[in-house]
Image (cartoon, grey):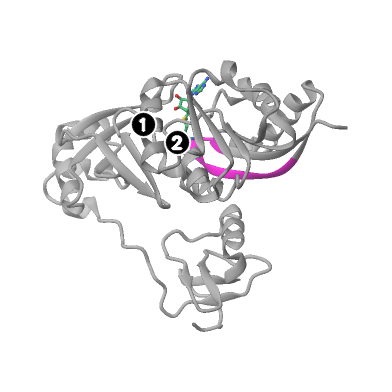
Amino acid sequence: MSRATPGKNRLAVIADNKDANESLKRVVALGAFDKSRKIIKRERHVEIPVIRSVSGYELVIQVEPAFYRQKPDLLHALQGRLPQECTHLIPRGWFLLGEVIVVKVHPDLRAYEHLIGQALLDFYPRCCTVLADEGIAGPFREPVRRVIVGDKTQTVHKENAVIFHLDARKVMFSPGNLMERIRMSHFGKDEYVVDMFAGIGYFTLPMAVHSRPRKVLAIELNPNAYHYLCQNIRQNHVEDIVESVLGDCAKVTPDGVADRVVMGMVQVTDQYLQKGISALKPGGILHYHQTIPTSMYPAAAIRDVTQAAAALGCRAEILGHVLVKKFSPGVVHVVIDARIDKDF
Ligand SMILES: C[S@@+](CC[C@H](N)C(=O)[O-])C[C@H]1O[C@@H](n2cnc3c(N)ncnc32)[C@H](O)[C@@H]1O
């Protein structure tokens, strides 16, 4: 490790072992984390890879950075097998859910999608199916996906020591929410948590596995997602912590019980805000997800929370905000963390 002038792609900040998690969260929240490299643990400190300096941390240049494996190059693999005029449309990104590869294919490449699927399978020998991703639809935010190659769509996705059984064709799982799932895994110790939009356990399970809340009430309306939620509770051995409820959180969320409420839905979450706030005990914490115009980040989402709290005669103390991901052109997915004060 040298301590000279910063160089391209090899910068890291030094954090004490004891507050490595807090430092990582800070680096991520500031948008400075370099996802292409691994965090390196030394005897007394960790090196967190960054794309620029972060105030309050010593910056170093890593002599031997540990890069994640380079993503395979589909353009290269398909060279000469597609008409020249189509090559600029070849997908550059895809993601893996267990043994299933999910990829967006441009409509003009439909005639070649089998070739694309086969090339992707060649990159990942343990995968068996490739699905074409055609977006998310409906009130349950279900994926619209088509099989390109293979037939097995039920799979087991492992992440952060949590097991997610899912059908990649039928239930959503957003790779862009990874850091938020990890962030939530640090919350909830000994608490009563209500997860109002539990899905297959995106936030419920990381919390239950890593933080061991006293109880998580996981509510889900879609029977399909609920089926996997129940299976995942068993597979992760957290039946003693998580109670699952099949129902509409607008109707079944209890009032005044929770130390923490997670509202992991987007687009319509504001319609459920008063219910989420009512579920909290005085001083409880709310995690409010929403999609808002990039130009209004984070004010629009903060305003939702403060207004809903005021309408209920409560006060919202904004603890922080997280930019989860770009959602669509000009729109971002954010989370507002707020403490709800009811006794004043
Ligand atoms: C967008 S998904 C959760 C995504 C999650 N934030 C992630 O990390 O990918 C939201 C879940 O809320 C469920 N849902 C939608 N409306 C609901 C309601 N009124 N009550 C309970 N669950 C609901 C949907 O079926 C879906 O499984």
Q: Position of residue 183 (x, y in %)?
A: 55, 49
Front residue of 297/87: it is 297
**What's drawn in magenta, residue-wise?**
318-333
Binning the other alpha carbons within 10 Å of mark 1 as few (below 14), some (14 to 19) or many (20 upward) gives some
For disc 1, does the CB lie below 8 Å from ligand 1?
no
Q: Position of residue 56 (x, y in %)?
A: 68, 68
Q: Is residue 216 left or right of residue 68?
A: right
Please name the residue shown 41% across and 61% down the image: 36
Q: Which mark is residue 228?
A: 1
Instruction: Examine the image and state in which quarter residue 91 appears.
Output: top left
Q: Which mark is residue 304?
A: none
Rounded to the nearest angstrom, the CA distance separating label 2 from label 1 is 8 Å
Reply yes or no: does residue 22 show up in magenta: no
* Mark 2, residue position: 201
Of callouts 2 and 1, the N-terminal one: 2
Instruction: Examine the image and state in which quarter residue 231 appears.
Output: top left
**Residue 299 visible from this viewpoint:** yes
- Please, what is the dominant secondary structure of the magenta stretch? strand
Q: Position of residue 332 (x, y in %)?
A: 55, 37
- Local SS, label 2: loop
Please name the residue shown 58% across and 15% down the image: 251
Reply yes or no: does residue 329 show up in magenta: yes
Kindly check if marks 2 and 1 are in contact, taking CB atoms under 8 A apart as contact. Answer: yes
For disc 2, does the CB lie below 8 Å from ligand 1?
no
For badge 2, the amino acid type reads: Gly
**Residue 8 visible from this viewpoint:** no
Residue furthest top in the image: 251
The quarter in which the C terminus is drawn is top right
